[in-house]
Amino acid sequence: MRFLFGTIAKDLRRIVRDPVGLIAWVIMPLLIGGVATLASGGSGPEPKGTLVVVDRDHSFLSALMPQIFGRPPLSDMVQTENADYETARKRIDAGKASGVLVIPEGFARCFLRSQLVELTLFTNPSQRITPAVIHEALVAETEAAFYVQRVAGPELATYSGSGAASDAELVRRTLAMNRIVRKASPYLFPQLIKLETHELDAHQNDHRLIILFYPGLIVLAVFGMAQASSEDIWKERSLGTLARVRATPSPLAMFLTGKIIALWLLFACLGMAGVSLAHLTVQAPNHFPVASVLWVATSGVLLYLVAVLLQLVAAEQRTGVILNSLVLFVFGMIGGTFFPFELMPRWLARIGEFTPNGWTILQLKKLLAGSLTAGSVACDFAVLTILIAAGFAVFVPLVRRWAV
């Protein structure tokens, strides 16, 4: 056991003495995540404008016109105010309003009689988004009014007369409108759909893209460190360390086990830092923190075995580095490290889930989200342990033949 602990201490000292490579693989995922967040634009404030309404009709229908901006989502972008024409023109000329809507006198009478009536809209040329929203909303409202006139024109005309209607006239109007509503009900009142709304916390919503990225970025850092550490096998060979270990009574397998344990501790520290940082800064979910860190560390061992086996089949160190870089790039692109599975085409995401890093990310996300049971977690760790044992069983004899 003294030999094993000595090997672990030796590799940990070598890792600490080369902090540049360690820092590089920690910084690179942070840079990728930062660039992705900047590219997404974040969730900045929504544009909000003012529509000044000049109501010269002062009727019930003219008061309904601006009410379209009183409900979300338009109410979040446009607020309405009433003013006289001179005040409204001064406000828009000063750039303090996005638009001015002028409703002429006689608007309600013309609408009920299906007569032509002209609404005037002035927009602020110095603004682009809000005036366009106001214009499109009013166009949609006038088109809806047109179809109402086509369907219920004669009945609407009966409301344009002056004076109080008789009881018989009120009954006739009610029955006529009821027939129209029943006729149009298949289009106005389709089969109801149950809608469930879940509102995200505003701060959590701002960082949703980072939450999608960060499990893959953690695995990317682990994958990169695993590949960088796999090059150490060439140094051990060139310095004669492997040959000397073979000549000692201590088994080569124990020496290699010590190297893997040292890397496991490094991966555990990285996983702990990544998971904790994401939870503290962007409130990322973290339902099983201990299991998540253990999963990152143990998965890192599997990724290391993949990388070091590629080094062993290479004819020289440069070939091994190129081969590992190619695997990192391809697996990173399709395996969810550079781009989350949620942002990828479904067919490509299904392929990426079968890569070593893709499977690792998929299970890590489930652990963080708390969607796995204790039995599922144990099963996943058992599968991971079997894969590591199989890789180690191939790794040791290859190193024994390769060391000479």
Image (cartoon, rainbow, N blue to C red):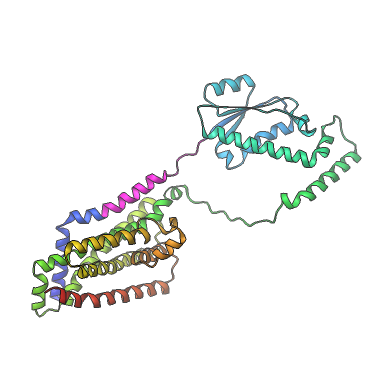
Q: Residue at x 54, y 34 (%)?
A: 130
- Position of the N terminus by quadrant: bottom left
Assess whether residue 46 is covered by the magenta stretch. Answer: yes
Decide if residue 63 is on the left or right side of residue 357.
right
Question: Is 311 rendered above or below residue 38?
Answer: below
Residue 313 location (% of width, % of height): 21, 70
Query: In the rendered view, does 274 fall on the left or right side of 65?
Result: left
Q: Quadrant of the C terminus?
A: bottom left
Can you tell which quarter of the image residue 236 is in? Answer: bottom left
Vertical placement of 159 versus 83: above or below?
below
Tell me which corner region of the image, top left, top right, bottom left or bottom right, holds residue 339.
bottom left
Q: Residue at x 38, y 74 (%)?
A: 378
Left or right, 151 with reference to 312: right
Nearer to the camera, 270 or 354: 354
Question: Looking at the image, is 218 positioned above or below residue 401?
Answer: above
**In front: 318, or 242?**
318
Across and down, in percent, residue 164 comes to: 87, 33
Q: Is residue 369 visible?
A: no
Which secondary structure type mostly characterizes the magenta part of the structure? helix
Stretch in magenta:
26-47
**165 horizontally vs 50: left or right:** right
Residue 133: x percent and y percent? 57, 36
Question: Where on the picture, by quarter, is residue 140?
Answer: top right
User: 348 and 120: which one is in front?
Assistant: 348
Residue at 69%, 32% (x, y): give it.
63
Residue at the (45%, 66%) spot, across then down: 371
